[in-house]
């Protein structure tokens, strides 16, 4: 692997006698992993049903090392939303963010959504989660991943952090800033990052990092927490960003990150006039830990939170909701709680007390329940993934070795005897995959077209 010369020189200056140990890591494969979706299954239960050769990630109890050669994306477990494929070090930032149930949380630079799904699992269906990426194309990946995970309480935006901060100042208990960066810590994993690595790109990243972190500070309640993370080693993008932020924001402090898992400390000596508190930050080095490169800082906003009042969303007119309510009554054993909002015949179920988001580019508002059509209501793939089999009247549950599972995931019609006609939740080993329409022992496939196996 050919690394930029100016990068090699910089790393030699930073690491000194450790440089040779670091550079040798490029002779080995990058670490790969999966993180279990605790909205659907516990890590212990997952270990019992998984056929993968997995080993626990010490800093994330839901995380496991898993070899890419086992093709985790081609498993029914993945299609059932039981885990997210994620590099192990990338699990650290959301793990460190002290999210509690019923919190309001925002992931500001969220695509493709791995950290968003991790935060959603921590919220456990409570509170509200905003997930944002300024690129609408990249933000579409967030939508896919929250739907796969069965997340009900997430709003996906595609707007600038500055615009969001102007509307929702002081609203959030926790903010995650996984900042755009030079990506030095991912060189071993993704060679394409090296091709785009240059000084002008790094200058753009540095400005973005400062601006995004300042927006995060405005979004945060007094007493709340920010995690700032990057996947780069550069002190200019790590310690210096935090050092400059502390100079400009004396109402913030750094919270020490536990180093028991092998995390290294932040390096105040790598920054001119570096604040000694920077040692409370954490660094992950591939020559010291089983993961790629990361930097994490945990910040706390001093003070006591004020009660913030925002205009909230309201139910759409009840007369337009009749097809939805009829579907729920006939096909589900549970109520779908929340605010029902119809947008262009799409029915969303929004978390209670969700503030209005008019004027923003909104890709998803809570749970997309389905579409109102001329002949009634058609449930969505997202709703299927958010339901358990005991919550529906009609389900078809297949054994994992049943060849009909693969056929269903490819979009084919499959046979299933002794089931009444109508909407059916198709499951494998008790976990939902999607919808079908039963007719005389045949399941007409309603699995989302964009999700189908090739």
Image: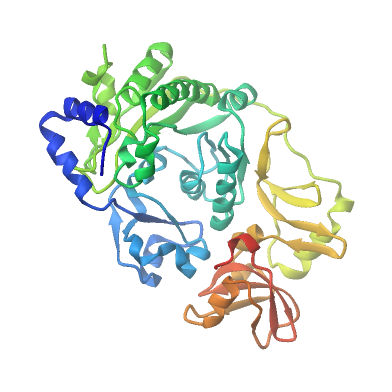
Residue 405 is situated, as x and y percent measured from the top left of the image, at: 55, 77
Is residue 48 placed above or below 28 in the rendered structure? below
Of the pair 434 and 15, the residue shown nearer to us: 15
Residue 171, picture quadrant: top right
Could you tell whether 431 is left or right of 332 in the image? Answer: left
| x and y, in percent, of residue 177 in the image | 46, 32
Specify whether 308 is left or right of 84. Answer: right
Residue 148, position in %: x, y? 56, 57
The reply to whether residue 127 is in sight is no
Quarter-wise, where is residue 155 in the image? top right
Could you tell whether 309 is left or right of 287 in the image? right
Q: Residue at x 62, y 73 (%)?
A: 426
Quarter containing the N terminus:
top left
Location of the C terminus by quadrant is bottom right
Q: Measured along the vertical axis of the image, is residue 377 above or below residue 57?
A: below
Q: Nearer the viewer, residue 144 or 254?
A: 144
User: For this rendering, which residue is in front, 53 or 206?
Assistant: 206
Q: Position of residue 221 (x, y in %)?
A: 53, 25
Residue ID at (33%, 54%):
32
């Amino acid at each position: 692997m050919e690394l930029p010369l100016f990068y090699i020189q910089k790393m030699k200056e930073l690491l000194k006698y450790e440089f040779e140990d670091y550079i040798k890591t490029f002779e080995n494969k990058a670490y790969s992993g999966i993180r279990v979706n605790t909205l659907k299954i516990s890590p212990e239960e997952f270990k019992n049903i998984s056929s993968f050769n997995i080993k626990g990630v010490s800093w994330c109890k839901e995380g496991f090392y898993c070899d890419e050669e086992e093709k985790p994306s081609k498993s029914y477990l993945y299609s059932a939303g039981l885990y997210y494929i994620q590099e192990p070090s990338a699990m650290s930032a959301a793990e460190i963010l002290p999210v509690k149930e019923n919190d309001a949380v925002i992931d500001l630079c969220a695509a493709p959504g791995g950290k968003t799904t991790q935060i959603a699992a921590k919220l456990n269906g409570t509170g509200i989660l905003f997930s944002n990426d300024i690129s609408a194309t990249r933000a579409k990946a967030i939508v896919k991943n929250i739907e796969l995970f069965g997340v009900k309480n997430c709003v996906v935006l595609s707007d600038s952090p500055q615009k969001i901060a102007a509307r929702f100042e002081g609203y959030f208990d926790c903010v995650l800033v996984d900042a755009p960066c030079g990506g030095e810590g991912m060189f071993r994993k993704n060679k394409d990052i090296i091709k785009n690595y240059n000084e002008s790109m790094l200058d753009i990243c540095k400005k973005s990092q400062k601006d995004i972190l300042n927006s995060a500070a405005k979004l945060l309640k007094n007493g709340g927490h920010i995690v700032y993370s990057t996947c780069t080693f550069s002190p200019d993008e790590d310690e210096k960003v935090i050092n400059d932020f502390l100079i400009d924001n004396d109402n913030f402090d750094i919270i020490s990150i536990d180093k028991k898992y092998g995390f290294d400390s932040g390096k105040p000596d790598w920054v001119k006039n570096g604040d000694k508190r920077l040692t409370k930050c954490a660094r992950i080095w591939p020559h010291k830990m089983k993961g790629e490169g990361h930097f994490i800082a945990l910040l706390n906003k001093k003070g006591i939170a004020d009660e913030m009042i925002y205009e909230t969303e309201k139910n759409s007119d009840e007369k337009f909701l009749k097809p939805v309510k009829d579907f729920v009554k006939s096909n589900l054993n549970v109520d779908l709680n929340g605010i029902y909002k119809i947008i262009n015949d799409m029915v969303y179920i929004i978390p209670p007390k969700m503030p209005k988001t008019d004027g923003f580019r909104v890709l998803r508002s809570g749970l997309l329940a389905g579409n109102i059509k001329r002949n009634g209501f058609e449930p969505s793939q997202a709703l299927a993934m958010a339901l358990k089999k005991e919550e529906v009247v009609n389900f078809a549950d297949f054994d994992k070795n049943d060849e009909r599972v693969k056929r269903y995931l490819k979009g084919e019609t499959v046979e299933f005897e002794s089931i009444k006609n109508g909407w059916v939740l198709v499951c494998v080993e008790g976990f939902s995959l999607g919808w079908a329409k039963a007719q005389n022992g045949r399941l007409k496939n309603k699995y989302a077209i964009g999700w189908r196996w090739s």
